[in-house]
Amino acid sequence: MKQLPITTEEELERAIIHFKEHADYISGYQEKILEKYLWKAQELKNIDLEFKIRTFLISYYNNRHKFDKMFAAFPWLLQRCDENLERFDYKHVLWLYRLVVLMSKQYSAVPKAKVIELFDDFERRYREMGIGEKMISSYKFYFYAEMGEIEQAEKEYTVWQEAPYAVFFQCKKCDELFLDSYFAASGRYEELLELLQPVLDGSITCHGNERYGLHRAMLSCMMLGRWEEANVYEVRSRQHLDQDVAYLYPFSSHLLYYGITGAFEKGRILFEKQLPHARETAPDMPRLKFFTASQEFFRRLHQSGRTFVQLNLPGFTAVPAGADGYEVAGLMKYCQNEMNRLAEALDRRNENDYFKNQTMLLVKRYATTEREPSKR
Amino acid sequence: MSSNSLFQVDLNGILKVLSDSLYSSYQVFIRELLQNSVDAINARKHLGDAFTPAVTVNFMQSGDVRTIFVEDNGVGLTWTEVDEFLSRIGSSSKSGRQDRESFIGQFGIGLLSCFMISDEVIVISKSAKKQEAVKWIGNIDGTYQKMQLEEEIPVGTSVYLRVKDSIKLDENLLESLLGRYGTYLNVPIRFFVNDQEKNNFQRDFPWRVSADEVISAGRSAFKEEFHQYIPLKDRSGKTTGVAYIIPRPTHTVANNSHAIYIKNMFITDHCTTILPEWAFFVKAIINSENISPTASREEIYKNQVLEDVREELGDCIKQFLIQLSETDPTFLHHIIGIHGTALKSLALNDAVFFRFISKWFSFPTSEGILTLEEIKQQTKTILYVPDLDEFKQLLPVARGNGQLIVNTGYIYDTEIFNRLNELDKTAIYQAIDVEFFGNILKDLPLEEVDRYRERLKQLQYHLDYFNCELEMKEFSPDSLPMIFYMSQKSLIERDVKTIQQESDDLWSGITDAVFSFEQAYHSKLFLNRNNPTIQKLLNQPTSSSDELFMETMYINSMLLGHYPLNKKEMDIMNNNMEQLLNKIL
């Protein structure tokens, strides 16, 4: 997109329309342009244009997994709506709010009281808007499941099943797929594959379901020893992912696949690309998942006889690097430490030991999974 | 119990489908008839008959009654072929033949289009294969009659249509349709009005005639003042044509329409898929023997053959430009001047083309518009500024200090320079911003720094409130007191801070937990030691007006750089303005 000199409100409005028609929300170059438009709207003191640009930005930050920016920018939208409900698109803001609620609990630095307060505010607003029980219930389920309150989550699932469809926002096609991350986390792989069937057969392609569903199908197949299917889903999943974006959840499954199948070169490149995200702004839950898979990857690399590995990681000094590269055992230890630290931090915040137990279980499960020799 | 039955076809329903969904206009009937005539003539040629091919179209008007006669001396139809090919929808005399490639039509639905303009279609035909003449009358209600003719008629087929009252069709429109569909068919088409010859159509494609003819055909087809064209030919030689270079700048998202002929028959002048997307600086006329039309014959079929043809025609355009650099570099400059954006887009998608063309590209620089080659003659360390506003800010300083900088704020230019950085090892390409540039400006001698250290500290104190860092440099022109810099990252952090301050405890706490502020200072002010006002400021003792001076300078820099002011900055600006006005009074 051309960087247009913008001096008037009309020019800015035209530029926003042009952006909306031509931008893709995945390309990194768009961020700079959108942020420039934001400064221009502020300079022109046009709050309506600023509102539009900020809603684009939130979607953009979400798609690029820049959740820290998403969190920081969101309250502005909510405040403007609270000041004048008629003037701004409150419904759209509530749609974006669910992204914020989903991600907030994934940071251990957000205290439990704040997570609860945020969810209460979200629930209140959804109820006031009449959005409906089913929608709220699915987010409540997520809330309990990701806070490690499994019994409560199971109860909420019953509420969800009985609740009528929501008035807004409900995608009847992929609605039930919200259970996929829970099934994956709790090792219910058969159920997960059944749930994901519409994604696997191509009848559901909406709402990023391929990006987040295919890697889970691959993981399930690996854990169930269905390697032929796992191989297919690995290739299909990769087509929906960009290694320059912090897709830590999906890439964790891929890293594990590369470790178990001995595709160490692919895994090395992937680790190199994703580690900077895992060390910087990504939420703790996907980071935990990433380090759990990474420690297993390096364990297997070490087991294969490799002592050192070359990695291009500027600024990474947690493991010393020599002329031969990084020591594989050192990297494994680093990933294990990070994994344990993150699990503990999340448990401390949640006041339970869910992540510690779940991580131990996964470490054991990953270590004992082998590719069938005949399929090699 | 089982039985075999035939589908019952409602002709009226079929016609509605054809007119509503398949054909864009009733006017296509003439194309279908011409196509049948040309195919019939080709079929007769295949028999080895010696004859002079001819098609005549006669428009008869008597009062309100309008009749059209289309006659050819092609292969004709036998008594049994009439049943098979005229009375059976979807059956074509050409679809099963081994030599089908030489025919335009293949679907067996063309004659039906005549029912869009006439309730009755009369066909009289004599086959070259059998000495029998037959008359066939098709009716809009789906019935037809067939009879043998006793009288002697020449080999060929005649179609008679009485035009419905509701159809707007006069001799002029028919003549123009014949021109559109019939000009390049390689068969002479004579047009009569009430038996008087009015026009005839038979021409070869312009690229087979002369350069003048090509230019003239392009100007007439696209209503543009073309001066230059590129010959096009795919590897098989089955697709040929010309691409005209549009003599004015085109937008990168422009989707140019090209005129397409398949086997000499006009298909569409709105084709957007025959050339690659990057070729938005040309308009083409193309005739193809290997790409296929859709059933409506108003578009081309998207398949692998089309993909290959598109790529190969794209190669012709690239090769033309490469040759031009040797044979007529002035003209290449001219083309790049008009279509630089398109060519940059193309270069970024094609490494070979990039290596050849990049040196010809022009960029705005602090020394005016220069080609890459000219830039490299001036400096081997090329500093480029990816941001338009920052380039504008740096321009006077760069000029004053004799430093060449390149503005790459326009589309593709930053990507071009990033790519050059990877590929061209004969120069250093460095992306810069104001801060980078400020830091390569001349530092003050150490004793000067020491002399002003305390004074600078006092001045810095008044900027701490804005999170702005002060630094002293020496640069030209002397008239410029300072350069101001605020990075994108700083602006984001400033914005987040403002939102956080306006938020309640819940949101403020969440931002604290999730967002990490990294910038020690949000902005930077490089003071110019050579500027008389700055010298005055540095040499005077601390005073109550320091605050007003520094704040005003900061706010002014923000405004000049088009940075948004927050509320506290706005308040300070208003307050300072009032103070200044009071001082004047």
Image (spheres, coloured by chain):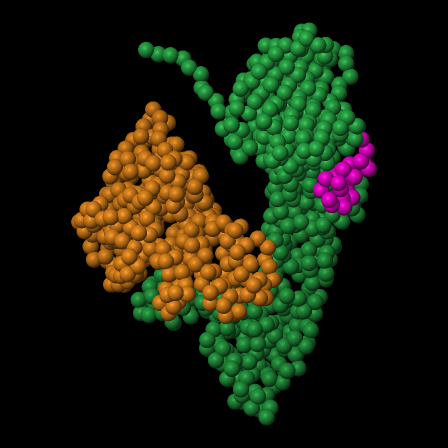
Chain colours: A orange, B green
For image coordinates 46% across by 65% down, the residue present is A48
Q: Is residue B223 part of the magenta span, yes or no?
A: yes
- Residue B94 position within the rendered picture, expressed as x and y whole percent measured from the top left: 61, 17
Q: Quadrant of the N terminus of chain B?
A: top left
Q: Is residue B366 above or below residue B223?
A: below
- Residue A356 position within the rendered picture, expressed as x and y whole percent measured from the top left: 23, 50
Q: Is residue B534 part of the magenta span, yes or no?
A: no
Q: Is residue A129 above or below residue A243?
A: below
Instruction: Left or right? Give the position of B507 relative to B522.
Output: left
Please indicate, yes or no, whether residue A250 appears anywhere in the rendered image: no
Residue found at the very far front of the displayed protein:
B63
For image coordinates 72% across by 62% down, the residue present is B367
Q: Which residues are magenta?
A: B209-230
Q: Is residue B495 above or below residue B59?
A: below
The front one of B113 and A226 is: B113
The answer to which image quadrant residue B7 occupies is top left
The answer to which image quadrant residue B498 occupies is bottom left
For image coordinates 80% across by 41% down, the residue present is B327
- Residue B34 position within the rendered picture, expressed as x and y whole percent measured from the top left: 68, 25
